[in-house]
Image (cartoon, helix red, strand yellow):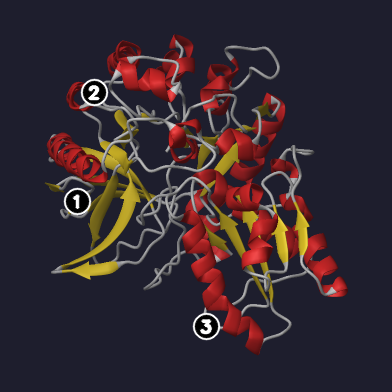
Amino acid sequence: MRTYGCQMNVHDSERLSGLLEDAGYARAAEETTADIVVFNTCAVRENADNRLYGNLGHLRPVKDANPGMQIAVGGCLAQKDRGEIVRRAPWVDVVFGTHNIGSLPALLERARVRREAQVEIAESLEHFPSTLPSRRESAYAAWVSISVGCNNTCTFCIVPALRGKEQDRRPGDVLAEVRALVAEGVSEITLLGQNVNAYGSGFGDRKAFSKLLRACGDIEGLERVRFTSPHPRDFTDDVIEAMAETPNVMPQLHMPLQSGSSKVLKDMRRSYRQERFLGIVEKVRAALPHAAITTDIIVGFPGETEEDFQETLHVVREARFAAAFTFQYSKRPGTPAATMEDQVPPEVVKERYQRLIDLQERISWEENTKLVGTEVELLVAEGEGRKDGEHRRLSGRAPDNRLVHFAVGEGEEPRPGDMVTVEVTYAAPHHLVADSGVRNLRRTRAGDAWAARNGLSGKEQPGVLLGMPGIGAPAEQPAPAGGCCDT
């Protein structure tokens, strides 16, 4: 299973893996040639199609040498390109879209029996995908989809055409999934949607999202709740109050800015302006003074002037983001922005982008430096334990989702999913370091679940832990669901 793009795609791949395992398949070992290779694609990232066809090209001789091998392509690019994939790569066996991931096992069998490619692209969602089986990549942290699709019409984004209109799950179904996950040992969940805080529009409750956050706070054993990604247009005071008043909702907010210029935001068809965005940031800071706020920013949108770009820099200085996913604008076929006049020259985009990176790096470093000397409780993450000088280090995520590398001494053997308290001793722009040792180790049911999944008694500490980039992991995270779709 190879996944590209946002957290929504990562979660879809968990479902695809669950479907295949239910159908009798087993995950192939890394050093073996798989009988089935599935690409779950993204149509948002730049050069997504080139990356896919390059990988398919590399697989062609492998498949020629193994005639029984099957290749399937799904996700947003499959939804967009449909029959084009089989035309350009006729050795592909199955193409399926974002609305019919549940069809994959049947399509593979049909392709095998008929000995011809099967292309099935549903135009709308028949069943909410969370009803499908899922092979969770983490024993202690999980994505939980509360909605799929998007009702916005941003001029740079193709996702509504590929994921469809927003469809919300009923709150009872969401909470039942969360409770089931907690019973299995999960201690952290991330509520997931293209636009999570618009949740409830499908069944007429404008406060449904804040109610959902509070309800998660009542679930015993659930230690951390996160969500991604909200839209500034739908960010209401009741959500901020729920974040501040629900202890297990983490002091973290990822909210896409895209541009600090109200003129550019209007051209992007983003239904908020600079003042609205900064007003939300101010309210969040007042209610949660130690919250880490992150964002997405596009540089060089068509028509962006130097004055517009200065407005973006102004918002970055005012908001003091802990981090930012920053992107140089590039045309996405099928979007209104791709045909707009006044496309910004690439060399101008590149120069502005570097200035933005330099500013954000400085702010991130300054904000991280403020944490030196403070104690933080970390959810220990999967990843590779490594020696750095005289220290053996593991990694974890702080409540505000900052990445912290911490030193462990002899006899200190925290497992992924356990909690440790450490003191921050060093700050860098993208991570923190805690080299003074573990102040407190709290073994958890989540750590027990990780040990059970990995066939350990619960006390062993393996030399290398295989993990998924994303929740709680030290590897680079996939872009947030709304963030990816926005950019």
Residue 182 visible here = yes
Q: Nearer the viewer, residue 159 or 361?
A: 159
Q: Earlier in the sequence, mark 2 or mark 3?
A: 3
Please, what secondary structure does the residue beneath circle 3 have? loop
**Which tag is nearer the camera, tag 2 or tag 3?**
2
Q: Which residue is mark 1?
A: 434
Query: Which quadrant holds the C terminus?
Result: top left
Q: Which mark is residue 57?
A: none
The quadrant in which residue 88 appears is bottom right
Please state which amino acid type lies under the numbered disc 1.
Answer: Ala
Residue kind at label 2, given as amino acid type: Asp
**Residue that extends furthest to the front in the rendered view of this protein:** 341
Q: Residues within 10 Å of mark 1 (few under 14, many from 20)?
A: many
Q: Residue at x 69, y 34 (%)?
A: 176
Q: Is residue 432 above or below residue 111?
A: above
Residue 237 in percent (x, y) is at: 43, 10
Left/right of residue 444 with respect to residue 283 in the rendered view = right
- The residue carrying mark 2 is 308
At numbered mark 1, what does the secondary structure look like: helix, strand or loop?
strand
Residue 31's tag is: 3
Estimate the spatial distance between the alpha carbons at disc 3 and disc 1, rounded to whole Å: 35 Å
Left or right: 137 as drawn, with respect to 476: right
Q: Nearer the viewer, residue 302 or 231?
A: 302
> Crowding at label 2, few (<14), some or many (≥20) Cα neighbours within 10 Å?
many
Residues 331 and 245: in front is 331
Q: Is residue 456 visible?
A: no
